[in-house]
Image (cartoon, rainbow, N blue to C red):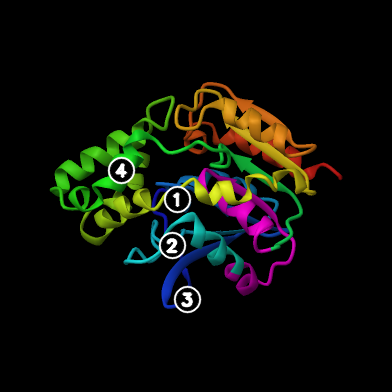
Amino acid sequence: MINWELPETFDFHGREVRYGVLGNGPPLVIVHGTPWSSFNLRHVIEGLSRNFTVYFHDLIGYGQSDKGEGDVSLGVQNKVLDELLTHWELECPAVVGHDFGGATLLRTYLINGRDFKKIVLIDPVAVSPWGSPFFRHVKEYEAAFAGIPDFIHNAIVRAYIGTAAYTRLDANALDATVEPWATGDSKVAFYRQIAQADSSYTDEVEQQYSSIARPVLILWGEADTWIPIARGERLHEMIPGSIFHTIRDAGHLVIEEKPEELLQQIQLFLSEET
């Protein structure tokens, strides 16, 4: 599934969102994070599609969706998902989110009032503080970063992505992850999404986590250096009745490193009666 194409389009106020639907069964929505795309969830999507109808999209500003100027922050991603859920005619699907995708699901549930049957969060951006020194540097010098030569930019993206994994990524998977950010408008979009990352969007809902009434599974790569496991433990404490499970020998990019173990835990959780 290395040749990844999202065949469908949705118009979000003049901005194109690309999405796909795969499988048969109860509805399940899966949302990627940053700087990833739905491509990086391909193993999980394919596995879940054996038992579910899986809906997936590239966030605004990412992957195959619109990368033009505009809001690509967490503040808009829940609005996009809210409208997609209406477009897909889904009322209470199971949901899975990685990184910013987890934050997007939480904001959609808590701000937009969308109900989800069960919620799976994989190394989510959910508890402050978050955002690396690199994020802060890009925010201050966004225009300078956007103007660097392509070969330097590509080296930065490759090195940055590499720090998210505990084990070395497959070369083809790394190439396919870098490709959406490679040149031109896509290069500018890479620094735009970092510059617009702001913990105020998780601060806005953090105090509401205790009100989450649906079953929640939190999965965390034990070697995650982007969001340390202590944040996952804290999130587990904040969500009543949540389940917390760690994945050994995996970092923040556990979706690429240990997809089979993720699938096992997700499928077990989704199959349990509540």
Question: What residue is pinned by disc 3?
Answer: 11
Foreground pick, 98 / 138: 138
Amino acid type assigned to the residue bearing label 2 in the image: Ile
Q: CA distance from mark 4 to mark 1?
A: 12 Å
Question: What residue is pinned by disc 2?
Answer: 60
Amino acid type assigned to the residue bearing label 4 in the image: Asp
Rendering quarter of residue 239: top right
> Which span of residues is magenta-colored?
83-112
**Residue 29, image x, y percentages:** 63, 56
**Residue 209, image x, y percentages:** 70, 45
Helix, strand, or loop for circle 1? helix
**Residue 107, image x, y percentages:** 61, 55
Helix, strand, or loop for circle 3? strand
Q: Earlier in the sequence, mark 1 or mark 3?
A: 3
Foreground pick, 132 / 9: 132
Question: What residue is pinned by disc 4?
Answer: 175
The answer to whether residue 196 of the structure is visible from this angle is yes
